[in-house]
């Protein structure tokens, strides 16, 4: 299935229209998803799950209707890539686990026989003495066995609980609220310091800080001078993301354009350049990792434990640690003061090192401003190869 989404922003605020419809056409202009009414999932947030689309380029045509106003039609080009047998990267749950290990007590355990809806038995917790202070810790069930197999009929309502009591003699953890389905032997559970929903928000905000260099090609016609790059790549939202612009007969011969200038126009980023030849324009830009999920474009970021991101674990964990300090300062300050976790400054310094490693991994181009001749009135900045 293909998820197509968009945010409708009016005066800087997410705002729903009276009616929103979506239609999708392929590169030849043929309608592949007939017009359908899409209700908002939240104010100004629209998402539609379309039938599977074959690899290729498509245009999503969103039409917003508001009483007393002219219909607002927004076109967004997106690409569906060929499926791969396996995705290279780490899951959202693995990112959360890496963050959890940095911000407070965190353990993964395997369920033992004898569990019930009112208690889970963990063999490693069986002892004649108390092995730890587990009361008030969050107990998370992701619906996975120790070998990674999915547990049938796992309920989202059974996902998170708080440990009410720990009995070391039996290794039993009693939840504050009974589960509908009891934990099964061999299931993996996690004990967290932070509430799981907050941990998810921390991970997602951390991913918004993480970027990688991506390259996109756009078909060009002769005399093209202004290119709305956000229309092709909606993840480009700031001029500073653009690094290089080339043109030519891809893939045979590409060269730097004579000059270019990146500018903001409303919510879109455009590139102004000299007339280019018929062929392709190739742009290198910093792309947020949250926009590339399961090997496809995502406008909403990851939202499931098993969603895969092509990001290095340490980079994501360090970014999440910074977000944790921003969102959960009262929880992190005491444990940092006791030496059980690193300070906010140490976390920030660690992330800065990772961030600069990735952001500066692509060499900069020598830039020169044209000051005379026919281009004097344009005041552009160009690249010298």
Image (cartoon, rainbow, N blue to C red):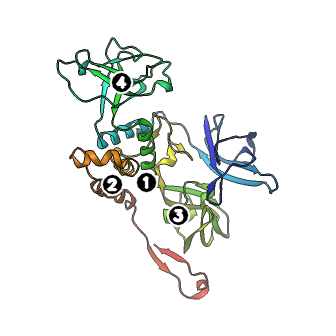
Label 2: few (<14), some or many (≥20) within 10 Å?
Answer: many
* Residue that numbered label 4 is attached to: 188
Please, which residue is most extreme toward the bottom here? 372
The mark nearer the N terminus, 4 or 2, is: 4
Side of 243 relative to 263 (left or right): left
Label of residue 334 in the image: none
The mark nearer the N terminus, 1 or 4, is: 4
Assess whether mark 2 and mark 1 are in contact (beta carbons under 8 angstroms). yes
Decide if residue 88 is in sight here. no
Quadrant where the C terminus is found in the figure: bottom left
* Residue that numbered label 3 is attached to: 254
Q: How many labels does the image show?
A: 4
Side of 219 relative to 185 (left or right): right
Distance between mark 3 and mark 2 Cα atoms: 35 Å
Q: Give the residue drawn at x 40%, y 37%.
A: 195
* Residue that numbered label 2 is attached to: 351
Q: Give the residue drawn at x 35%, y 20%.
A: 174
Please, which residue is most extreme toward the left here? 128
Which of labels 1 and 3 is toward the front?
A: 1
Distance between mark 1 and mark 2 Cα atoms: 10 Å
Distance between mark 1 and mark 4 Cα atoms: 30 Å
């Amino acid at each position: 299935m293909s998820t197509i989404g968009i945010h409708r922003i009016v005066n800087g605020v997410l705002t729903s229209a009276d009616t929103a419809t979506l239609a999708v056409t392929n590169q030849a202009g043929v309608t592949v998803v007939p017009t359908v009414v899409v209700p908002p999932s939240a104010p100004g947030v629209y998402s539609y799950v379309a039938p599977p689309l074959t690899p290729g380029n498509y245009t999503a045509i969103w039409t917003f209707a508001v009483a007393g106003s002219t219909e607002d039609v927004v076109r967004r080009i997106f690409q569906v890539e060929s499926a791969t047998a396996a995705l290279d990267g780490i899951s959202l749950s693995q990112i959360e686990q890496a963050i959890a290990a940095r911000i407070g007590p965190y353990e993964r355990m395997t369920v033992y026989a004898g569990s019930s809806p009112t208690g889970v038995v963990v063999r490693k917790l069986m002892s004649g003495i108390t092995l730890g202070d587990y009361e008030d810790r969050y107990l998370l069930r992701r619906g996975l066995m120790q070998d990674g197999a999915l547990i049938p009929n796992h309920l989202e309502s059974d996902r998170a609980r708080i440990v009410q009591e720990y009995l070391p003699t039996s290794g039993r953890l009693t939840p504050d609220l009974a589960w509908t389905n009891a934990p099964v032997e061999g299931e993996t559970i996690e004990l967290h310091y932070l509430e799981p929903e907050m941990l998810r928000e921390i991970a997602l905000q951390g991913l918004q800080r993480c970027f990688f260099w991506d390259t996109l090609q756009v078909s060009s016609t002769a005399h093209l001078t202004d290119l709305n790059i956000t229309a092709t790549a909606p993840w480009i939202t700031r001029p500073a993301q653009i690094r290089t612009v080339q043109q030519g007969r891809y893939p045979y011969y590409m060269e730097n354009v004579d000059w270019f200038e990146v500018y903001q126009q409303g919510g879109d980023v455009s590139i102004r350049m000299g007339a280019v030849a018929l062929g392709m324009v190739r742009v290198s830009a910093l792309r947020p990792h949250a926009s590339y999920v399961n090997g496809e474009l995502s406008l909403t970021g990851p939202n499931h434990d098993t969603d895969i991101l092509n990001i290095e674990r340490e980079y994501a964990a360090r970014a999440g640690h910074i977000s944790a300090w921003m969102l959960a300062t009262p929880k992190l300050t005491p444990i940092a003061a006791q030496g059980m976790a690193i300070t906010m400054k140490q976390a920030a310094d660690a992330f800065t090192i990772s961030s600069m490693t990735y952001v500066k991994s692509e060499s900069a181009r020598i830039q020169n401003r044209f000051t005379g001749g026919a281009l004097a009135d344009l005041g552009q900045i160009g690249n010298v190869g």
